[in-house]
Image (cartoon, coloured by chain):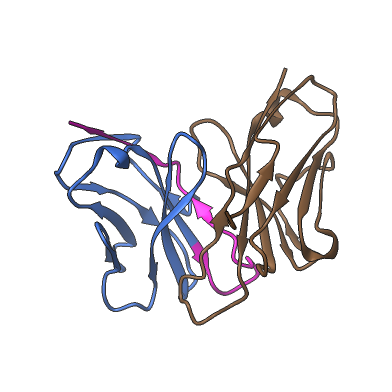
Chain colours: A brown, B blue
Amino acid sequence: DTGVSQDPRHKITKRGQNVTFRCDPISEHNRLYWYRQTLGQGPEFLTYFQNEAQLEKSRLLSDRFSAERPKGSFSTLEIQRTEQGDSAMYLCASRPPATGTPSNEQFFGPGTRLTVL
Amino acid sequence: AQKITQTQPGMFVQEKEAVTLDCTYDTSDPSYGLFWYKQPSSGEMIFLIYQGSYDQQNATEGRYSLNFQKARKSANLVISASQLGDSAMYFCAMRENRGSTLGRLYFGRGTQLTVWP
């Protein structure tokens, strides 16, 4: 399967602990997005990478959140000192370089469901 | 202001019937794209259909069609001949192609579709 993969699929942690999620995009997709989806809501944008450069961060991404994409391949999202309000599904999506396809849609991974106790 | 509004939290349709899921959007960008994604209980977002703001014809993809009314800023999804496997959450999303949004998607709150036999 050559789709977007995310690891772990589920994470349960205690408040105050640090957690790290990984996203492996589709190969040759140079653009990568992180979203957060809380219960009953649509996904909300967190951050965007083009190759290894983090070009945009949402105001939702507090100082406790950090994301990296070393070498423009996989990406990690770390949450420090987790809070109960961080409980959500964290979705990663990748997108190819601009092509002749008008949609140039984002391809999503299965998500990591985080529960903070 | 909400960029994407989905006013139907839940919809029910009998198998083999058609169903329309509503979506309205708000943008001042003259160039934008509208997307519909399906999210089964497994969590992965599955791309269904795309409509560009300059497209003259409504998009169609198999049993999916998009009823695009630009003046009313609506982009309703029509699913024909519903199947039990269509039961899922459906999200309308928008990408603004100009400005500094770098391709992020804005999502609505979704509509839970249930197909019954």
Of the 4 image quadrants, the one containing the C terminus of chain A is top right
Q: Residue at x 42, y 60 (%)?
A: B35
Residue A47, magenta (yes or no):
no
Q: Residue furthest left?
A: B17
- Quarter assignment of residue A36: top right
Left or right: residue A84 compared with residue B111: right
- Quarter assignment of residue A99: bottom right
Q: Residue at x 42, y 63 (%)?
A: B34
| Residue B54 picture location, percent across and down | 37, 78
Of the 4 image quadrants, the one containing the N terminus of chain A is bottom right
Q: Magenta stretch: give its range.
A: B95-117
Residue B110, magenta (yes or no):
yes
Q: How many marks?
A: 0
| Residue B87 picture location, percent across and down | 32, 37
Residue A111 versus residue B102: which sits nearer the camera? Answer: A111
Q: Residue at x 52, y 44 (%)?
A: B44
In this view, A55 is above or below A80: below
In this view, A117 is above or below A22: above
Q: Residue furthest bottom?
A: A100
- Quarter assignment of residue B55: bottom left
In this view, A59 is above or below B55: above
Q: Residue at x 84, y 39 (%)?
A: A64
| Residue A44 picture location, percent across and down | 59, 46
| Residue B47 picture location, percent across and down | 44, 56
Residue B43 versus residue B24: which sits nearer the camera? Answer: B43
Left or right: residue A70 compared with residue B111: right
Residue A25 versus residue A85: which sits nearer the camera? Answer: A25
